[in-house]
Amino acid sequence: MTAARFPGEPAVEAQDLEKIYGSGNTEVVAMKEVSFRVARGEVMALLGPSGAGKSTLLTAIGLINPPTSGRILIGGVPVMDGSRALVDLRAFRRKHLGFVFQKANLIPFLNARQNVQIALEINDVPPRAARGRALELLDYLGVADRADNLPSMLSGGQQQRVAVARALANRPDVILADEPTAALDGFRGRQVMELFRKVAHEQGAGVIVVTHDHRALDVFDRTIEMEDGRLRTPKQAVAEG
Ligand SMILES: Nc1ncnc2c1ncn2[C@@H]1O[C@H](COP(=O)(O)OP(=O)(O)OP(=O)(O)O)[C@@H](O)[C@H]1O
Ligand SMILES: [Mg+2]
């Protein structure tokens, strides 16, 4: 039981989220009646067809794209009430959230170690300590031997490991990943998914990964599925109802 190993508030709680893009006849209801929790130490997959609202949900929780209504709590702290921010979003994001995208988006003129180190330094970690922690993280993710290399000298899988190291740098409560393995082959993709699992279980982060890759679903503690902006009701819940 992962949740029992990391007691306390859930890492993420979404309450009745709704997102409407546009207005009038261009209005799109991208998210509706979305409620769920992710425990600390839990790694959850978010599935669903293209246009289902997965990125809308992830960016809402990531405090990048506010919902139209509903509430978001991170680490037990209410952070959004509808589109109204209850905390300083930039500062909160930097301290408590980690992101991984489809492409690693590393800074091209910084080496692997510097790409991780800079994430720490913008959170006021002194350079020496930041350097040490960056090397430690690269080691944890199995790319310590690439610390001095520029991103252009790394394979896609290695770049994505550096991106995961960067996302972990500030020990976030929540890690959000949007199709992080889409650019990788099955084997490398699975390795990255297993890293998310390891990070959740060992460090107590709540991890949400949007994925279309059904081959790696066994890595996750739980999967939820979106369709037309709503969470699909799990089948057993329907049977019990
Ligand atoms: N900025 C926007 N303005 C208007 N509509 C948008 C905007 N972003 C997304 N949408 C619409 O909201 C719905 C959900 O989009 P979203 O990007 O969340 O889907 P998704 O599940 O991530 O899809 P994919 O698997 O293709 O990435 C879609 O109908 C999309 O067209
Ligand atoms: Mg998307």
Image: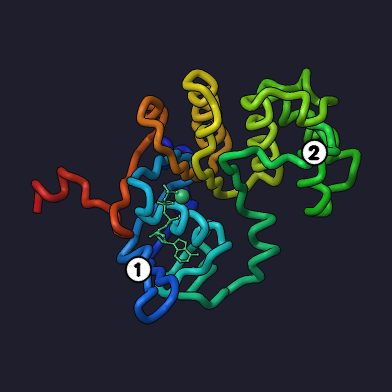
Residue 29's mark? 1
Left or right for 80, reference 240: right
* Above-or-below relation of 49 to 87: above
At a point 81% along the width and 40% down the height, the residue shown is: 117
Q: What coloring was used for the rendering?
A: rainbow
At a point 78% along the width and 46% down the height, the residue shown is: 120
At a point 49% along the width and 52% down the height, the residue shown is: 11
Quadrant occupied by the N terminus: top left
What amino acid type is highlighted by mark number 1? Val
Disc 2: which residue: 108
Question: Percent position (x, y) of residue 197?
Answer: 49, 31
C-alpha gap between disc 1 and disc 2 = 37 Å
* Above-or-below relation of 219 to 173: above
Residue farthest to the bottom, as pictured: 24
Quarter of the figure with residue 16 = bottom left
**Is residue 13 something that shows in the picture?**
yes
Q: Quadrant of ligand 1?
A: bottom left
